[in-house]
């Protein structure tokens, strides 16, 4: 069903081509030394499904189960984004395409700042939400959710991170995700919280 190499390690595909996301997931799950994490960059002929889900959870499940079934390996996928309740929960599942289908991270941040011009103080509350899904070639095995709450600034700060990181300040932290050291962000992020809830399941998947 899935392939184990001679050292009894398990291959799991991170069903993403986003280099930032792949690096973050590998870093967070790096303690799982019995697992060899590949990404979709290792399968250049694979065509991911359209992200047609109406929620982060639906999209994560779609991506994980499709990759696992098509590539005949265990797969893990996440879908995540920024939610601003005062904007009717936008960008939400449209976070990666908020400014259009071919939008860059910069385009999306610019649109979010523009759409939030009229919002002040508590109305600038926002949260990152992440769902991760784990699947085998047989189907879905587990999902988990993580949330990280904070505030959207009125201008970008910091040169690190990706996506909306230069705009987001987590509660009780005085820096944006783009200003924090990567190791700090990886300890407190929404993706870390979701992946932590999958750790026990992943630990049991040794050869």
Image (cartoon, grey):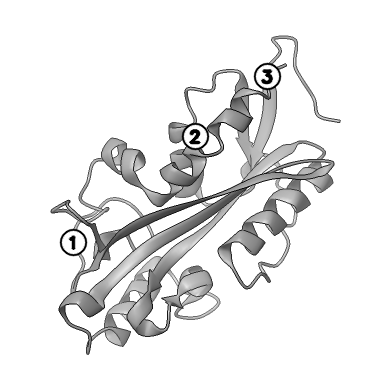
In the image, residue 84 lies at what x, y percent? Answer: 36, 75
Q: Nearer the viewer, residue 139 or 9?
A: 139
Q: Nearer the viewer, residue 111 or 79?
A: 79
- To which residue does mark 3 refer? 206
Residue 197 falls left or right of residue 90: right
- To which residue does mark 2 refer? 26
Q: Is residue 69 visible?
A: yes
Instruction: Name the residue: 16% across, 77% down.
Output: 121
For the N terminus, the quadrant is top right
Secondary structure under the numbered disc 2 in the rendered image: helix
What number is the disc on residue 123? none
Residue 61 falls left or right of residue 125: right
Q: Residues within 10 Å of mark 2 (few under 14, many from 20)?
A: some
Label 2 or label 1, whichever comes before in sequence order: 2
Q: CA distance from mark 2 to mark 3?
A: 17 Å
Up-down relation of residue 37 to residue 40 (above or below): above
Q: CA distance from mark 2 to mark 1?
A: 26 Å
In the image, residue 166 lies at what x, y percent? Answer: 26, 61
Q: Residues within 10 Å of mark 3 (few under 14, many from 20)?
A: some
Q: Nearer the viewer, mark 2 or mark 3?
A: 3
- To which residue does mark 1 refer? 157
Q: CA distance from mark 1 to mark 3?
A: 42 Å
User: Quarter-wise, where is residue 61 in the image?
Assistant: bottom right
**Residue farthest top in this picture:** 7
Secondary structure under the numbered disc 1 in the rendered image: loop
In the image, residue 184 lies at what x, y percent? Answer: 27, 39
Instruction: Name the residue: 23% across, 54% down.
Output: 159
Secondary structure under the numbered disc 3 in the rendered image: loop
In the image, residue 51 lies at what x, y percent? Answer: 66, 67
């Amino acid at each position: 069903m899935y392939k184990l190499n001679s050292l009894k390690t398990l291959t799991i595909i991170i069903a993403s081509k986003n280099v930032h996301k792949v690096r973050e997931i590998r870093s967070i799950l790096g303690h799982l030394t019995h697992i060899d994490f590949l990404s979709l960059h290792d399968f250049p002929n694979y065509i991911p499904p359209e992200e047609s889900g109406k929620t982060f959870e639906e999209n994560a499940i779609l991506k994980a189960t499709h990759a696992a079934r098509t590539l005949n390996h265990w797969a893990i996928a996440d879908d995540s984004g920024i939610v601003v309740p005062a904007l009717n929960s936008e960008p939400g599942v449209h976070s990666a395409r908020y400014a259009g289908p071919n939008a860059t991270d910069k385009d999306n941040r610019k649109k979010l700042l523009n759409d939030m011009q009229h919002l002040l103080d508590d109305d600038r509350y926002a949260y990152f939400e992440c769902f991760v899904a784990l699947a085998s070639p047989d189907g879905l095995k587990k999902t988990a959710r993580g949330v990280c709450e904070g505030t959207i600034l009125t201008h970008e700060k910091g040169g690190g991170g990706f996506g909306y990181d230069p705009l987001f300040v987590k509660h009780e932290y005085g820096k944006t995700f783009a200003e924090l050291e990567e190791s700090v962000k990886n300890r407190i992020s929404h993706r870390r919280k979701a992946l932590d809830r999958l750790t026990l399941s992943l630990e049991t998947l040794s050869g």
